[in-house]
Image: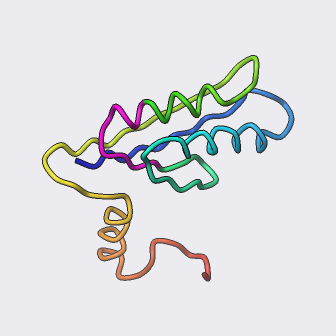
């Protein structure tokens, strides 16, 4: 089983959140998950929901602020393994092009 999730952890502050977000992302290194951070959050892949929830909890706890906002959206396909890159590839197949308008 592969569990794919979108995790967003941020302090509720007026200044830049980058330093605290970096702490949350760094906390994921202690877990058996793969991840990719983007401007809106971090996509995480894990073999089990237990590992996913533990990693998300660690990321949440890593942020040092009086108030922390965490959003976790999970796609738990229980009958087959599909990783995040496969999900994007299927969309790109339908588009007939990369799912971005950036020149990379």
Q: Is residue 15 above or below residue 96?
A: above
Q: What's the image's color scheme?
A: rainbow
Q: Could you tell me residue 8's position as x and y percent?
A: 57, 38
Q: Is residue 74 above or below residue 45?
A: above
Q: Is residue 2 left or right of residue 101?
A: left
The segment highlighted magenta reads 44-53
Q: Quadrant of residue 70?
A: top right
Q: Nearer the viewer, residue 33 or 36?
A: 33
Q: Residue at 59% across / 28% down in the picture? A: 60
- Measured along the vertical axis of the image, is residue 66 above or below residue 40? above
Q: Residue furthest front?
A: 30
**Nearest to the observer: residue 8 or residue 57:** 57
**Magenta includes 83?**
no
Q: Quadrant of the C terminus?
A: bottom right
Residue at 45% across / 71% down in the picture? 99
Q: For this rendering, which residue is in front, 55 or 74?
A: 55
Task: Give percent across and percent down for residue 40.
Answer: 60, 48
Image coordinates for residue 24, horizontal then vertical, percent: 64, 38
In this picture, residue 12 sits left or right of residue 101: right
Residue occupying the far top of the picture: 66
Residue sitting at 36 percent across and 46 percent down? Answer: 46
């Amino acid at each position: 089983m592969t569990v794919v999730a979108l995790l967003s952890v941020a302090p509720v502050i007026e200044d830049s959140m980058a330093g605290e977000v970096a702490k949350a992302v760094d906390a994921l290194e202690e877990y058996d998950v793969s991840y990719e951070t983007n401007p809106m959050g971090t996509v995480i892949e894990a073999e089990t929901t237990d590992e996913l929830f533990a990693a998300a909890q660690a990321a949440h706890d890593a942020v040092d602020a009086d108030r922390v906002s965490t959003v976790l959206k999970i796609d738990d396909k229980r009958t087959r393994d599909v990783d995040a890159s496969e999900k994007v590839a299927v969309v790109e197949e339908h588009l007939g092009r990369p799912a971005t308008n950036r020149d990379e």
